[in-house]
Image (tube, rainbow, N blue to C red):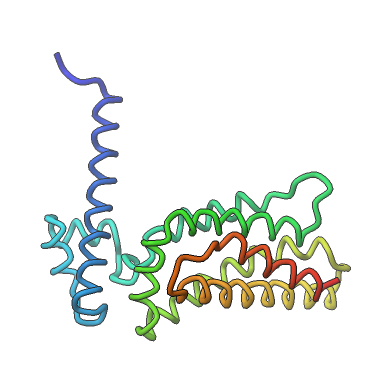
Amino acid sequence: MTASPEAHAGLRDRRKTERRAALVEAAYALFRDRGFAATTMDEIAERAGVSRRTAFRYFPTKEALVFPEREERFARFTELLRPAPRESGFDTVRRACLALAADYDADRARVVAQWAIVKDEPSLLGRELQLDREFEEAMRGVLARDVPSGPRGDRLARVRAGAILGAIRATMRVWLESARPVDLIALGRETFDDLAAGMS
């Protein structure tokens, strides 16, 4: 009895997920032990038990291995930015950011491990800033609902999105560098309360 096409597709998807996870696990272990710059894709592929070609098929660059969840996280954020009825742009952004904070809090060990890799590597810090710009632009589009149309309104939306992103980055640093686990959602609420007071 042969397996159905659906079963073959399911097995194929599971293998892809397993290979991807193996590459990320291997990369993080090597980055932790040797540093990002000193680790090669060949070493990551060998440790993960796949070919170099396969490794590059899943992750086109070594930097992509440091931020494996980026596309999924950004897609979730843009979905969360869909406004609820009678919700201001600021409240939409607040709700979306606090929902992501819950995701980060639930995956703290991985996020802290990622920060340990990123914080001392200038190229990764630069890449992180590039990724953050996409989140900032998504927030700007939502915050534009709260301001008048025209050049001044556009500037206000950009300033507010930049202020929110800066506050989020500062809050994340407190959470990441705390000697003991801190409730990121509670920190996030305090940050947005402070922002709301400043933007009112």
Residue reaching furthest to the front: 180
Q: Nearer the viewer, residue 184 or 78?
A: 184
Q: Quadrant of residue 24?
A: bottom left
Q: Quadrant of residue 90?
A: bottom right
Residue reaching furthest to the top: 1
Residue 151 in picture, x, y percent from top left: 83, 77
Count the labels in the image. 0
Q: Is residue 120 above or below residue 165?
A: below
Q: Is residue 129 above or below residue 59?
A: below
- Determine the residue positioned at 16% across, 18% down: 2
Residue reaching furthest to the right: 148
Residue 85 in picture, x, y percent from top left: 80, 44
Q: Quadrant of residue 61?
A: bottom left
Quadrant for the N terminus, please. top left
- Classify residue 138 as left or right of residue 52: right
- Determine the residue positioned at 26% across, 66% down: 28
Residue 32 in picture, x, y percent from top left: 24, 73
Residue 154 in picture, x, y percent from top left: 79, 73
Q: Nearer the viewer, residue 134 or 5?
A: 134
Quadrant for the C terminus, please. bottom right
- Determine the residue positioned at 64% across, 75% down: 167
- Determine the residue positioned at 73% across, 78% down: 159
Q: Is residue 21 above or below residue 27?
A: above
- Classify residue 134 as left or right of residue 83: left
